[in-house]
Image (cartoon, grey):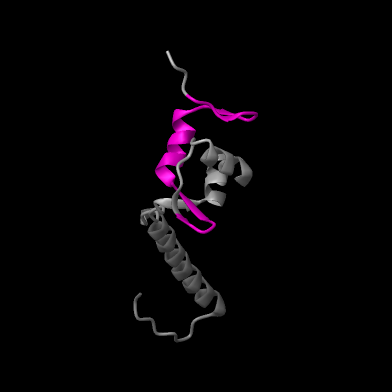
Amino acid sequence: MQNLVFTQLSILEVRNLLREELEIFFIQKEAEKETKQPEPQPEYITKKEAAKLLKCSIATIDNYRRNGKLKRYNHLGHIVRFKRSEVLAAIEGKSINKKRGLEQPSKN
């Protein structure tokens, strides 16, 4: 910002100067937001996060885990984690049937 000497400026001139500086400031902030890299996703996610990704209930995630459709990791007491990549693969690689959950690939 340039050095300004405020001598005999009207209130309108001061407002215009402030408005211009604020516009520049906010334009720069928006540019910074666009250039920031997204935060890396954690490798392991909770049952709740897996349910959100698969758009199903936590009970369904428990059923998938018991049936071997999803593999659990880091099982300490009641703490169960799933690999994000495996949950995403379940979404992409298999069709989701709302009544029966994840369908197994057909055997040909």
**Residue 15 at x, y percent in the picture:** 53, 74
Q: Is residue 72 above or below residue 17?
A: above
Residue depicted at x 39% and y 85%: 5
Q: Is residue 55 visible?
A: no
Q: Is residue 8 magenta?
A: no
Residue depicted at x 43% and y 46%: 84
Residue depicted at x 57% and y 51%: 48
**Residue 72 at x, y percent in the picture:** 46, 46
**Residue 49 at x, y percent in the picture:** 53, 50
Q: Is residue 76 visible?
A: yes
Residue depicted at x 58% and y 39%: 63
Give the quadrant of the N terminus: bottom left
Quadrant in which residue 40 is drawn: bottom left
Q: Is residue 24 above or below residue 57?
A: below
- Residues 107 and 3: in front is 107
Q: Is residue 47 above or below residue 108?
A: below
**Span shown in magenta:** 75-104
Give the quadrant of the C terminus: top left
Q: Is residue 80 magenta?
A: yes
